[in-house]
Image (cartoon, rainbow, N blue to C red):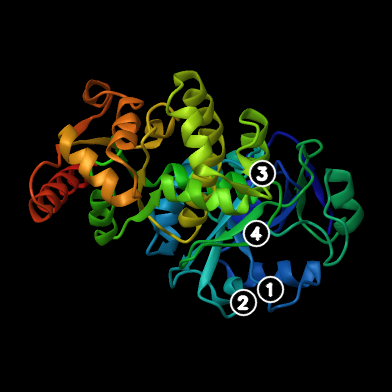
Amino acid sequence: METKRITDHIADAAAIIRAGGLVAVPTETVYGLAGCGLNEQTVRQIYEVKGRPAVKPLSLMVPDESAMERYCEAVPETARALARRFWPGPLTIVLRAKEEIPSIVLAGGKTVGLRCPDHPLTLKLLRECALPLAAPSANPSGAESPKTAGQVLGYFDGKIDAVIDGGPCGIGRESTLIDMSDTPYRILREGALPRETIAAALAEELTLVGITGPSGVGKTTALQELGAMGALVLDCDEIYHELLEQDEELLAALEEAFPGTVREGRLDRKALGRIVFTDAGKLAELNRIAHRFVTRAVDARLRDYAMQGGRLAAIDAVELISAGLAEKCVATVGILAEREKRIERIMRRDGISREAAEARIDAQKPDTYYRENCSHILFNNADADRFSADCRALFKEILNHG
């Protein structure tokens, strides 16, 4: 067999594919050994030429996101979101396969990986032949993955029908492989696309509701109602206090800004309170430090939650807007209450004097700030049951319109 080198006559390569032949193709990562993924005999040839163990399934190259519906069952919206974000590109998404995918491709399993390569010649080939391509890397099993057509010919000259010479591959690493056939999602192989990049993209697809307002208004109750609706609930105040117990970097930053407030590895909160609640500049500095560490922790938890397959989350933060967290939210709900009720709640909750509670309130932003910056406002001046009912009604409205 003569292996043909193709540079621009992609129709010739498409004809070979449709006839059941094998064509090595360029991608942005490495060259692949491609054949029709719906032709069992062709797929068997790929295994034989590569010396690939039959227990290892093959992925399919496809031209775009629409292939998910054609070849896969129960496609989650998150998989479509990753395809829109990273295809064409070095990401293989594993989903439940439809029955028309030959069992030899699946190696006895029930899932198939789909990949849309970022190379113009291979994308043109996919459109020309209108078939999914089984295309593992174009090397004998165990050998280095080829980055040029010359390397492919060094392996398979005379053993395959053609190679499309698209020049050297730019990345030189295999695609990242993520299994989204079930939750939690799993990175089966971390390649050219980092796990953190994928997790961050999934986190951006979360429906995120922000809860904010000054101290003593009842934000925790609102957060509990969202939790009852299935949301991951993130109380930034709780996260901040957890970090104070665990994060040495945060404690070092606080001691540097407010000398004498960290003793033997622990924060003296009352000492810090005496400094910041009587000095607007000091309070602003504390907020800047807290925002940086809390936002980092929130982002990490949202990424982990998204990788678990989560879809709804809520953030409770006094400084939701100034910390930049509101920008991540589909809606921001400001909760307000009468001053006297707030004083009573703060005194009871924190065990402090009326004077200290009033000082805390006076150091925080006025109600007008939340009215001007939040998409919705809830008032917590009635009994607990009434407020809970108001929360449920508003959150259902927000989610129905989201």
Q: Position of residue 249 (x, y in %)?
A: 67, 42
Label 2 element class: loop
Which quadrant of the figure has residue 236? top left
Closer mark to the observer between disc 4 and disc 2: 2
Residue 139 relative to residue 190: left or right: right
Amino acid type of the residue that numbered disc 3 sits on in the rendered structure? Asp
Q: Position of residue 27 (x, y in %)?
A: 70, 43
Amino acid type of the residue that numbered disc 2 sits on in the rendered structure? Ala
The disc placed on residue 35 is 4
Instruction: Write down the residue under mark 1.
Output: 56
Find the distance from the CA under tag 4 to the CA under tag 3: 14 Å
Q: Earlier in the sequence, mark 2 or mark 3?
A: 3
Q: Position of residue 126 (x, y in %)?
A: 57, 46
- Marks 1 and 2: in contact by CB < 8 Å? yes
Amino acid type of the residue that numbered disc 4 sits on in the rendered structure? Gly
Q: Earlier in the sequence, mark 4 or mark 3?
A: 3
Instruction: Write down the residue under mark 3.
Output: 12
The residue sitting at 72% across, 66% down in the picture is 46
Closer mark to the observer between disc 4 and disc 3: 4
- Marks 4 and 1: in contact by CB < 8 Å? no
